[in-house]
Image (cartoon, rainbow, N blue to C red):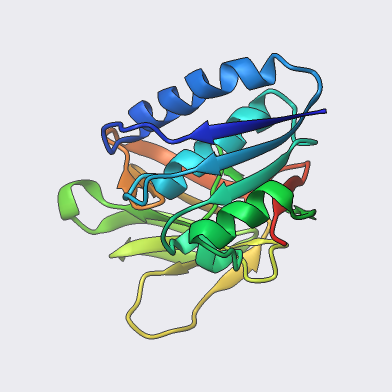
Amino acid sequence: MSFALIEQPQTQPDLAAVTAAAKALMRGPLADPGLSRVVVTTLGDTCGDLFFGAVVARLMIAERLDVEVGYASPISTPATHRYRLKTGPAGRTIAETAAAQSLTLIRDDAAMVLVGRARHLGVDGAPLYGEGIVDDERLFDGEVGAVEIEVAPDFRDVRGRVARRLPGGWRNGRAVQTGGPAIIVEREGIAATRPVKRSTFYKHHEPWKLIRG
């Protein structure tokens, strides 16, 4: 049984750079069949949640979701808020020593893991045009500002809604999907550079093990 500390490096705030950094740093730990725990430390910048999710994605792709994962962020983020994780030195101690909990893993069709928030947007600030569904229930059909996607508060589902100022409007399910001529996927606050015609966030068939204390 072994433990690996994965420290977020300085990278450009884009999906490709963060994913490449996580892949490179995880190559050594994943070569160890005895790996039992990974603790991810971040810089407290806008890429922290994205880097954490990218590390978990590497475990998913390698079929090593048996490995326990801790998140040591110096600041509060959407992911630490969602999973009610402590931050700073206390969070680091918990990530290294506390017990893990088996939770539903939310991923997308690009093999990225969602740990906080995502959005489906139009191109260059334009409205989003297309159709959105949560399971078999229509979320929208036509033009909207954006679609917001999160891990559900009970950690069992993914949830989505049309972006709005007022609270509420969430619909929970196994999958949130948007299709249209041009969709920009924003993961953990970082938008992709190229549009896609379809994007789906859904429940992975295996859970992951998050250290929550």
Question: Is 106 rendered above or below residue 80?
Answer: above
x, y percent for residue 93: 63, 54
Q: Dividing the image into 4 quarters, which one contains the C terminus?
A: bottom right
14 to the left or right of 188: left
9 to the left or right of 60: left
- The quarter holding residue 167 reads bottom left
The residue at 34%/27% (across/down) is 17
- The quarter holding residue 107 reads top right
x, y percent for residue 173: 66, 62
User: Is residue 150 shown to the viewer in this render?
Assistant: no
The residue at 63%/71% (across/down) is 153
The residue at 36%/34% (across/down) is 15
x, y percent for residue 106: 63, 49
x, y percent for residue 75: 41, 60
Question: Is 76 rendered above or below residue 118?
Answer: below
22 to the left or right of 180: right
Question: Is 42 rendered above or below residue 167?
Answer: above
Q: Dividing the image into 4 quarters, which one contains the N terminus?
A: top right
The residue at 61%/41% (across/down) is 39
